[in-house]
Amino acid sequence: MRRLLLALGLVAACVALSAAPAQACVGLDCDEPAVTTGPGSLTASYLGQAPGGAWFASTSAPLEHPYTYRLSRPCVINDRETGACQPSDFRTCPAPPGRVVQDLVPEQRRLALSGPDGTTVTQDGFPTGGAPVGTPVGPWITGNRACIDVTALNPPPSPDEVFRFFQTLPLPQLATRQQPPGDALVGLPVIFFTDSPTTQTFTVDIRGFTVTITAGATAFTWHTGDGTDLTTTDPGAPYPDHTVTHDYRSGTYTASLTTTWGATFSVDGGASVEVPGTTTTEGPPVTFDVLQARSVLTNPFD
Amino acid sequence: MTRRWSTRLGAVLLVGAAALTGCSEKQEASTSLPTATAEASEDALPPLGPESFPVPKQAREQTADGAVEFVRYYVALTGHLALQSEDPTPLLELSRDCRTCGQIADAFEADLGAGYSYRDYVYEFDEYGPALVDGDKAEMGFSYVQGPITAVDRSGQVVPTRSAPTPQELQSGASLVWDQTLQSWVITGLTVG
């Protein structure tokens, strides 16, 4: 609040983006929770209910609307004592395609309205102290948590929204490499690895925000083809640094690799935030024979 | 009926506290004994707040004026704790789920940990009027002019990030709830600016 101008008019809502949501105080003057991709607050000029009862926030309000609004993630409200978000703070709200609906706690604050003889008043008689028209007066009053359509406020993409986007990205399909190349031998473990890139960066546009998503492989599941799955956190390596091996009986096998991808993202060059979920890709299969070797005595001088 | 409350130094605050709690006019000797009920009523109001700066009686009345007095006291308490470098826990004990109160207490606690103290803590408090009371809840508005505030480190050097050299007016407000156990208002929300 320290940096806010006092003489606020009845202004349209604004959304700021901050990478460092520090909330320090000098005296009683504390910074507002900044609007980020995670915890933060949005401001709105209007909060209403559609005929079906759904809540929506808007940047435009009727002339001399008596309140201004602040919409916060529940953890911003609830972290007063714990200082941390709880799992229950992240409730997913159903959203129609193209709409941004978030689980938020609304707060409203009275605005000074024009009164008789050049004075200012509030809707419910709360004194304004002579504050100019449009000035927020009194305390923020907390309302009930609800799913609120904030599309009109164009908030930064939330982690959930980025996750939905992340699931559609063309992530690499890592190819399985095996040693020895070609046919393998019974009794000689087959080495698996992949030499495909295990990180990839995407820059995408989400509702006008430049979102950089850095995907990284977090787990590798090697389907050996004989019913065995081997899961590792590294991509393996060729001989002699191999880490993933499997012993086969003789036969023909088709092996493949499922890669689990996690990611971090940043909005408009801001702080890096973890994407709340993973996705997988299936690599192309490889088929090889495993042969039974037979010992044969030979004369090296023949 | 706006009253102005300002503070310049810790000493002023301490004198102010004494004025709130200790002054009385000369009274004639009573010809009747106080009733047991009256005595019990007096005793039923245990001290509240830090010993060095208790909540005044006026701030413990469940009235519109009492709510204003409590906010006035709470704001003064922040100045007292800052100037005396005291533990900010009373700010939490006299509030309920108040985010800003927690932030203020955290900042003061960090100051203590860093060895910072306050040389100046000047403010003005002007209430807009009596609080709006609805049952056990109340809301009030006030103009708060803060500054100069000067924090210094152990060597006496000013800490700019913890100081506010220029007075700044902040349209402010507070919401309160009456705590039956404490027999006092407590702050549930503090909006400054």
Image (cartoon, coloured by chain):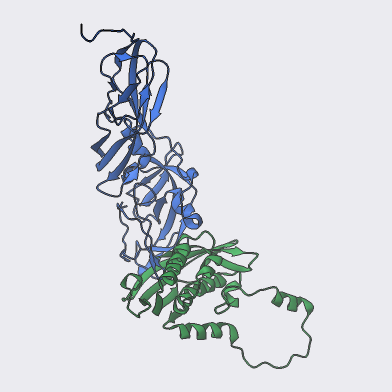
Where residue B79 sits: x, y (%)? 45, 76
Where residue A171 sits: x, y (%)? 28, 29
The residue closer to the viewer here, A28 or A165, is A165
The residue closer to the viewer here, A243 or A294, is A294
Residue drawn 38% across and 52% down?
Answer: A41
The residue closer to the viewer here, A262 or B64, is A262
Q: Residue furthest front?
A: A301
Q: Quadrant of the C terminus of chain B?
A: bottom left
> Residue B116: which quarter of the image?
bottom left
Q: Is residue B58 left or right of residue A158?
A: right
Give the answer, above or below, for where B165 lies relative to A83.
below
Where residue A39 sits: x, y (%)? 39, 50
Total marks shown come to 0
Give the answer, above or below, for where B1 lies relative to B135.
below
Give the answer, above or below, for where A27 lies relative to A23.
below
Q: Identify the chain drawn in green.
A: B
Give the answer, above or below, for where B59 lies relative to A205.
below
Q: Residue furthest top?
A: A302
Q: Is residue B13 left or right of residue A13?
A: right
> Residue A94: which quarter of the image?
top left
Residue drawn 23% across and 10% down?
Answer: A300
Colour in which chain A is drawn: blue
> Residue A3: which quarter of the image?
bottom left
